Amino acid sequence: MPAKPKSGKKLRVTLLKSPYGTGKSHMATVRGLGLRRCHHTVELEDTSAVRGMINKVSYMLKCEEV
């Protein structure tokens, strides 16, 4: 069952630091968020699954509500 978005809110996520050298699971998490390169920004639905992924690699992201 997919996670439900919180009332249609979106999050703007930007990759600030390279994921290389952080381990396979962190690199896969960054790719799963749709981030491809440094300073790349994506807008994602505000779901619990996305929040968990952001929490895992928060030290290399900038996140803001839209």
Image (tube, rainbow, N blue to C red):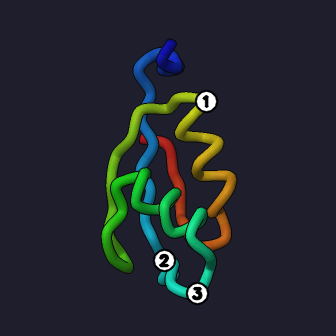
Indicate which disc, 3 or 1, sits on the residue closer to the N terminus: 3
Rendering coords of residue 58 (x, y %): 65, 62
Q: Looking at the image, is 27 positioned above or below residue 56?
A: below
Task: Residue at 52% x, 20% y: name it.
Answer: 3
Toward the bottom, the furthest residue is: 21
26 and 9: which is toward the camera: 26
Indicate which disc, 2 or 1, sits on the residue closer to the N terminus: 2
Rendering coords of residue 5 (x, y %): 48, 20
- Tag on residue 21? 3
Task: Residue at 56% x, 70% y: name it.
Answer: 24
- Tag on residue 16? 2
Task: Residue at 48% x, 61% y: name it.
Answer: 28
User: Which element type, helix, strand or loop, lies under badge 3?
Assistant: loop
- Tag on residue 62? none
Indicate which disc, 2 or 3, sits on the residue closer to the N terminus: 2
Q: Amino acid at mark 3?
A: Gly
Image-quadrant location for residue 10: top left
Nearer to us of marks 2 and 1 is: 1
18 and 63: which is toward the camera: 18
Quarter in which the C terminus is drawn: top left
Rendering coords of residue 27 (x, y %): 51, 69
Q: Amino acid at mark 2?
A: Leu
Q: Crowdedness of circle 3 by 10 Å Cα count: few (<14), some, many (20+)?
A: few
Q: Amino acid at mark 1?
A: Ser
Nearer to us of marks 2 and 3 is: 3
Spatial CA distance of label 3 from label 1 is 27 Å
Q: Which residue is mark 1?
A: 48
Spatial CA distance of label 2 from label 3 is 15 Å
